[in-house]
Amino acid sequence: MLLAGLLLLDQVAFADDAVDPRFVAFIKSDAHRAAVLKVAAAQAQGLPAPCAAARYRPAGDVDLYRPPQFDGGGRIIHGLWREQVLAEGCGTMELLNIFSLATASGEPELLGGLPGTTRADLVIQKQALPLAAKGLPPEAAQCRDVHVVDTVLAPDAPADRHMPWHETWTVLACDKAYPVPLNFTPSSDGATIALDTPPPHS
Protein backbone atom coordinates (compact mmCIF):
# COMPACT_ATOMS: atom_id res chain seq x y z
CA MET A 1 0.00 0.00 0.00
CA LEU A 2 1.58 3.25 -1.12
CA LEU A 3 0.49 6.43 0.58
CA ALA A 4 0.88 9.53 -1.55
CA GLY A 5 2.17 11.48 1.39
CA LEU A 6 5.25 13.61 0.99
CA LEU A 7 7.17 14.41 4.13
CA LEU A 8 8.07 18.00 3.42
CA LEU A 9 9.51 20.10 6.21
CA ASP A 10 6.90 20.11 8.98
CA GLN A 11 3.99 18.66 7.01
CA VAL A 12 2.86 15.15 6.26
CA ALA A 13 0.14 15.03 3.60
CA PHE A 14 -1.77 11.76 3.20
CA ALA A 15 -4.06 11.23 0.23
CA ASP A 16 -5.62 8.17 1.83
CA ASP A 17 -8.30 9.40 4.24
CA ALA A 18 -8.58 5.88 5.71
CA VAL A 19 -5.21 6.18 7.44
CA ASP A 20 -5.64 6.16 11.20
CA PRO A 21 -5.07 9.72 12.46
CA ARG A 22 -3.15 8.29 15.40
CA PHE A 23 -0.60 6.90 12.94
CA VAL A 24 -0.31 10.25 11.19
CA ALA A 25 0.28 11.93 14.54
CA PHE A 26 2.93 9.37 15.42
CA ILE A 27 4.77 9.85 12.13
CA LYS A 28 4.73 13.63 12.63
CA SER A 29 5.90 13.50 16.24
CA ASP A 30 9.24 15.13 17.03
CA ALA A 31 10.49 12.02 18.83
CA HIS A 32 9.82 9.70 15.90
CA ARG A 33 11.28 12.08 13.34
CA ALA A 34 14.41 12.50 15.42
CA ALA A 35 14.76 8.72 15.68
CA VAL A 36 14.34 8.28 11.93
CA LEU A 37 16.95 10.93 11.14
CA LYS A 38 19.37 9.39 13.63
CA VAL A 39 19.12 5.97 11.97
CA ALA A 40 19.41 7.59 8.53
CA ALA A 41 22.61 9.36 9.54
CA ALA A 42 24.07 6.10 10.84
CA GLN A 43 23.06 4.36 7.61
CA ALA A 44 24.71 7.04 5.48
CA GLN A 45 27.92 6.98 7.48
CA GLY A 46 28.12 3.24 6.91
CA LEU A 47 28.19 3.65 3.13
CA PRO A 48 31.47 3.99 1.21
CA ALA A 49 32.92 7.51 1.19
CA PRO A 50 30.46 9.00 3.72
CA CYS A 51 30.00 12.75 3.95
CA ALA A 52 30.54 13.99 7.50
CA ALA A 53 28.88 17.32 6.66
CA ALA A 54 25.71 15.79 5.21
CA ARG A 55 22.34 17.29 6.09
CA TYR A 56 19.29 15.07 6.50
CA ARG A 57 15.62 15.79 5.91
CA PRO A 58 12.48 13.67 5.41
CA ALA A 59 11.52 13.18 1.78
CA GLY A 60 9.40 10.83 -0.29
CA ASP A 61 6.48 8.58 0.52
CA VAL A 62 5.41 6.79 3.67
CA ASP A 63 5.18 3.24 2.36
CA LEU A 64 3.10 0.73 4.32
CA TYR A 65 4.14 -2.91 4.01
CA ARG A 66 1.93 -4.02 6.90
CA PRO A 67 -0.78 -1.57 8.01
CA PRO A 68 -0.33 -0.34 11.60
CA GLN A 69 -2.55 -1.72 14.33
CA PHE A 70 -3.04 -0.19 17.78
CA ASP A 71 -3.73 -1.71 21.18
CA GLY A 72 -6.26 -0.35 23.65
CA GLY A 73 -3.71 2.12 24.96
CA GLY A 74 -3.09 3.67 21.57
CA ARG A 75 0.31 2.04 21.03
CA ILE A 76 1.33 0.64 17.64
CA ILE A 77 1.84 -3.09 18.20
CA HIS A 78 1.73 -4.37 14.62
CA GLY A 79 2.90 -2.96 11.32
CA LEU A 80 5.86 -2.33 9.06
CA TRP A 81 6.43 0.87 7.15
CA ARG A 82 9.19 2.72 5.37
CA GLU A 83 10.13 6.38 5.49
CA GLN A 84 12.68 8.05 3.24
CA VAL A 85 15.34 10.58 4.15
CA LEU A 86 17.34 12.72 1.75
CA ALA A 87 21.02 13.17 2.62
CA GLU A 88 22.68 16.17 1.00
CA GLY A 89 26.31 17.19 1.27
CA CYS A 90 29.76 17.02 -0.29
CA GLY A 91 28.19 17.63 -3.69
CA THR A 92 26.01 14.52 -3.56
CA MET A 93 22.44 13.51 -2.73
CA GLU A 94 21.41 10.09 -1.39
CA LEU A 95 17.95 8.70 -0.75
CA LEU A 96 17.97 6.62 2.43
CA ASN A 97 15.31 4.13 3.49
CA ILE A 98 14.34 3.67 7.13
CA PHE A 99 12.00 0.84 8.12
CA SER A 100 9.94 0.86 11.30
CA LEU A 101 8.86 -2.52 12.65
CA ALA A 102 6.16 -2.38 15.32
CA THR A 103 6.83 -4.42 18.46
CA ALA A 104 4.77 -5.66 21.38
CA SER A 105 6.31 -2.95 23.56
CA GLY A 106 4.65 -0.22 21.49
CA GLU A 107 8.04 1.21 20.49
CA PRO A 108 8.92 0.39 16.87
CA GLU A 109 12.34 -0.94 15.96
CA LEU A 110 14.00 1.26 13.34
CA LEU A 111 16.23 -0.37 10.74
CA GLY A 112 18.15 1.05 7.80
CA GLY A 113 17.63 -0.56 4.40
CA LEU A 114 19.48 -0.22 1.13
CA PRO A 115 19.62 3.29 -0.35
CA GLY A 116 17.68 4.34 -3.44
CA THR A 117 14.18 3.68 -4.76
CA THR A 118 14.00 -0.09 -4.27
CA ARG A 119 10.54 -1.53 -3.64
CA ALA A 120 11.94 -4.52 -1.74
CA ASP A 121 11.38 -4.79 1.99
CA LEU A 122 14.19 -5.81 4.33
CA VAL A 123 13.59 -9.55 3.94
CA ILE A 124 13.61 -9.39 0.14
CA GLN A 125 16.68 -7.13 0.20
CA LYS A 126 18.53 -9.72 2.26
CA GLN A 127 17.48 -12.45 -0.17
CA ALA A 128 18.65 -10.41 -3.17
CA LEU A 129 22.09 -9.43 -1.86
CA PRO A 130 23.89 -12.72 -2.70
CA LEU A 131 22.32 -12.72 -6.15
CA ALA A 132 23.43 -9.14 -6.77
CA ALA A 133 26.98 -10.19 -5.93
CA LYS A 134 26.69 -13.08 -8.40
CA GLY A 135 25.73 -10.55 -11.06
CA LEU A 136 29.18 -8.95 -10.95
CA PRO A 137 31.47 -9.49 -13.95
CA PRO A 138 34.40 -11.92 -13.63
CA GLU A 139 36.92 -9.17 -12.92
CA ALA A 140 34.96 -8.16 -9.81
CA ALA A 141 33.97 -11.61 -8.61
CA GLN A 142 36.96 -11.91 -6.26
CA CYS A 143 36.48 -8.52 -4.60
CA ARG A 144 35.93 -8.75 -0.87
CA ASP A 145 34.82 -5.16 -0.30
CA VAL A 146 31.39 -5.22 -1.94
CA HIS A 147 28.53 -2.81 -1.21
CA VAL A 148 25.17 -1.95 -2.76
CA VAL A 149 25.34 1.84 -3.00
CA ASP A 150 22.14 2.56 -4.93
CA THR A 151 18.93 0.93 -6.15
CA VAL A 152 16.64 2.12 -8.91
CA LEU A 153 13.07 0.92 -9.36
CA ALA A 154 12.19 0.68 -13.06
CA PRO A 155 10.04 3.62 -14.24
CA ASP A 156 7.48 1.19 -15.68
CA ALA A 157 7.07 -0.78 -12.45
CA PRO A 158 3.38 -1.60 -11.89
CA ALA A 159 1.59 0.17 -9.05
CA ASP A 160 0.27 -3.19 -7.87
CA ARG A 161 2.85 -4.65 -5.51
CA HIS A 162 1.59 -8.17 -6.24
CA MET A 163 2.89 -7.91 -9.80
CA PRO A 164 6.50 -8.59 -10.87
CA TRP A 165 8.84 -5.64 -11.01
CA HIS A 166 12.38 -4.78 -12.13
CA GLU A 167 15.20 -2.90 -10.41
CA THR A 168 18.82 -2.06 -11.13
CA TRP A 169 21.19 -2.19 -8.19
CA THR A 170 24.55 -0.44 -8.27
CA VAL A 171 27.16 -2.66 -6.65
CA LEU A 172 30.52 -1.19 -5.67
CA ALA A 173 33.30 -3.76 -5.86
CA CYS A 174 37.00 -2.93 -5.57
CA ASP A 175 36.07 0.75 -5.82
CA LYS A 176 34.31 0.30 -9.17
CA ALA A 177 30.53 0.58 -9.68
CA TYR A 178 28.65 -2.10 -11.58
CA PRO A 179 24.93 -2.05 -12.50
CA VAL A 180 23.18 -5.33 -11.69
CA PRO A 181 19.65 -5.75 -13.12
CA LEU A 182 17.24 -7.83 -11.02
CA ASN A 183 13.72 -9.15 -11.54
CA PHE A 184 11.39 -9.60 -8.57
CA THR A 185 8.29 -11.83 -8.64
CA PRO A 186 6.20 -11.59 -5.45
CA SER A 187 5.39 -14.85 -3.67
CA SER A 188 3.63 -15.92 -0.49
CA ASP A 189 6.90 -15.83 1.48
CA GLY A 190 8.52 -12.77 -0.12
CA ALA A 191 9.67 -12.87 -3.70
CA THR A 192 11.44 -14.96 -6.29
CA ILE A 193 14.48 -13.01 -7.47
CA ALA A 194 16.43 -13.53 -10.67
CA LEU A 195 19.25 -11.80 -12.48
CA ASP A 196 18.00 -9.98 -15.55
CA THR A 197 20.80 -10.40 -18.07
CA PRO A 198 20.95 -7.39 -20.34
CA PRO A 199 21.03 -8.06 -24.10
CA PRO A 200 24.52 -8.27 -25.65
CA HIS A 201 25.93 -5.09 -27.11
CA SER A 202 25.77 -4.96 -30.86
Image (cartoon, rainbow, N blue to C red):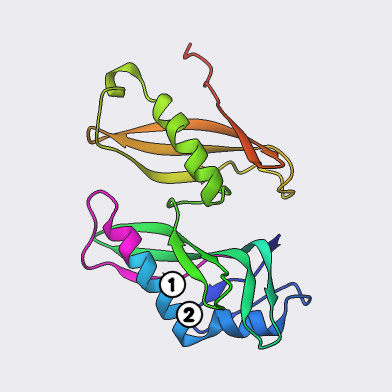
Q: Is residue 48 visible?
A: yes
Callout 1: 10 Å neighbours few (<14), some, many (20+)? many
Queried whether the magenta region covers residue 66, the answer comes back as no
Using the numbered discs, state the Cα–Cα distance from disc 1 to disc 2 in whole angstroms.
Answer: 6 Å
Query: Looking at numbered disc 2 in the image, what kind of residue is underneath it?
Result: His
Does 38 appear above or below 135?
below
Q: Which residues are magenta?
A: 42-62
Q: Which mark is residue 26?
A: none
Q: Which mark is residue 32?
A: 2
Q: Residue at x 46, y 79 (%)?
A: 33
Residue 160 as seen in the image, left or right of residue 195 = right
Q: Residue at x 55, y 65 (%)?
A: 101
Query: Looking at numbered disc 1 in the image, what kind of residue is underneath it?
Result: Val
> For the N terminus, which image quadrant?
bottom right
Q: Does dot 2 land on a helix, a strand or a loop?
A: helix
- In percent of width and height, residue 28 lies at 55, 83
Q: Which mark is residue 36?
A: 1
Q: Residue farthest to the right? A: 18
Residue 33 as seen in the image, left or right of residue 194 = left
Residue 119 as seen in the image, left or right of residue 141 = right
Does 186 appear above or below 142?
below
Q: Residue farthest to the front? A: 104
Callout 2: 10 Å neighbours few (<14), some, many (20+)? some
Q: Does dot 1 land on a helix, a strand or a loop?
A: helix
Does 155 appear above or below 46?
above
Q: Are marks 1 and 2 in contact (CB under 8 Å)?
A: yes
Q: Residue at x 40, y 38 (%)?
A: 170
Please count the marks in the image: 2
- In percent of width and height, residue 18 lies at 78, 75
